[in-house]
Image (cartoon, grey):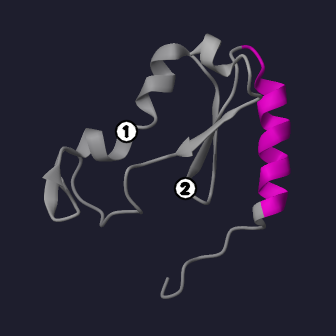
Amino acid sequence: MDKELEQWHVLLCPVAMTPAFTHCARGEAVAIDGRKVPYLMASGAYTIPFSFTGHPVVVIPIGMQIVGKRWREMELLAIAQELDQVVGSFQNPSGY
């Protein structure tokens, strides 16, 4: 992961494999595109790898996680702040 991030300041990737899914009991399978996916896979498949590698992550409320270089948390936070200004303040989806 360190080698992959050498040429980039950060990595942008989704937080989850789906939009927010209906609340369910922890461990209960989640329906994605008409099929059942294990809860941990649906909720953590895109976040858990960075816990293993030790890379810092910031999530902004558009379903995006910003992955930074290890030991460069302040740089990551500065980039996250800039992206947050670009996307604007969070607004609840219609109907909520």
The relative height of residue 91 versus residue 70 in the rendered view (above or below) is: below
User: For the residue marked with disc 1, what is the amino acid?
Assistant: Gly
Q: Which region of the structure is painted magenta?
A: 71-86
The residue to which callout 2 is attached is 63
Residue 75 counted in the magenta span? yes
User: For the residue marked with disc 2, what is the amino acid?
Assistant: Gly
Task: Give x and y (percent) for residue 64.
Answer: 58, 50
The relative height of residue 61 versus residue 96 in the rendered view (above or below) is: above
* Separation of marks 2 and 1 at Cα, in angstroms: 13 Å
Please identify the quadrant where the N terminus is shown: top right
- Give the residue at x 78% y 19%: 72
Return the residue nearer the eye: 34 or 72: 34
Return the residue nearer the eye: 14 or 25: 14
The relative height of residue 91 versus residue 64 in the rendered view (above or below) is: below
The residue to which callout 1 is attached is 44
Residue 15 counted in the magenta span? no
